[in-house]
Image (cartoon, helix red, strand yellow):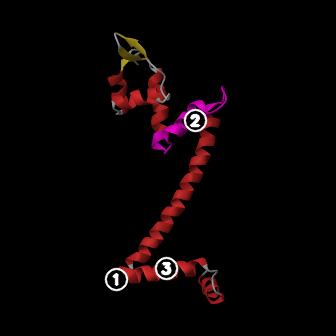
Amino acid sequence: MVEDLAISDVARVFGLRTSAIRYYEQIGILPRPMRRNGQRRYDNSVLFRLAVVQRARETGFTLEEIRELFFGFPPGTPPPKRWHKLSQRKIAELRNRMKRLKLMETLLKRLENCRCDALDECGEKLLRQGDQESQPPSHEATERQGRRS
């Protein structure tokens, strides 16, 4: 690998714009490069750092979480501990998001079966359903559910 990379070379390796690399420098994810004749010059370590950033982005980490990965732990904390802590939090977040998405899918399927003549009628039915859904299930509904299981 080359030890003296221009910003355009680094950008090309990862399919990034040079402005993204400058932004990563600005927010501290990438170290400030040395300059030669006013141009940024990078060594291979920036490629390694960007490989970690890219994988973290692919797995859904925000830039703030990526900053935490690099700088949010006591010095000497090994990478597996860093990844584990952040991954556990991200997995919990994803599970919550999947639950919300499943609920959205269920609600959309119900809406597909709409037989109302006017949106006001939909609103009235939705309001009634909301009231019923906030009530504890009736004895009869509980028995029906038990028979299905």
Q: In the rendered image, which quarter is residue 110 located in?
A: bottom left
The quarter of the picture where the N terminus appears is: top left
Instruction: Look at 49% across and 65% down and name the residue there.
Output: 102
User: Are the residues flagged by discs 2 and 3 in contact, CB closer than 8 Å?
Assistant: no
Badge number at residue 127: 3
Query: Mark 2 vs mark 3: which is more N-terminal?
Result: 2
Question: Is 118 placed above or below 20 here?
Answer: below
Residue bounds of the magenta highlight:
57-79
Q: In the rendered image, which quarter is residue 43 located in?
A: top left
| Residue 53 x %, y % | 48, 34
Front-most of residues 50 and 138: 138
Residue linked to disc 2: 68
Front-most of residues 148 and 43: 43
Residue type at mark 2?
A: Glu
Tell me the SS state at disc 2. helix
Instruction: Look at 47% across and 79% down and name the residue there.
Output: 126
Q: In the rendered image, which quarter is residue 11 located in?
A: top left
3D distance between C-alphas at marks 2 and 3: 44 Å
| Residue 95 x %, y % | 56, 57
User: Are the residues flagged by discs 1 and 2 in contact, CB closer than 8 Å?
Assistant: no
Q: Dot 3, crowdedness within 10 Å: few (<14), some or many (≥20)? A: few
Residue linked to disc 1: 118
**Is residue 118 in the magenta section?**
no
Query: Mark 3 vs mark 1: which is more N-terminal?
Result: 1
The quarter of the picture where the C terminus appears is: bottom right
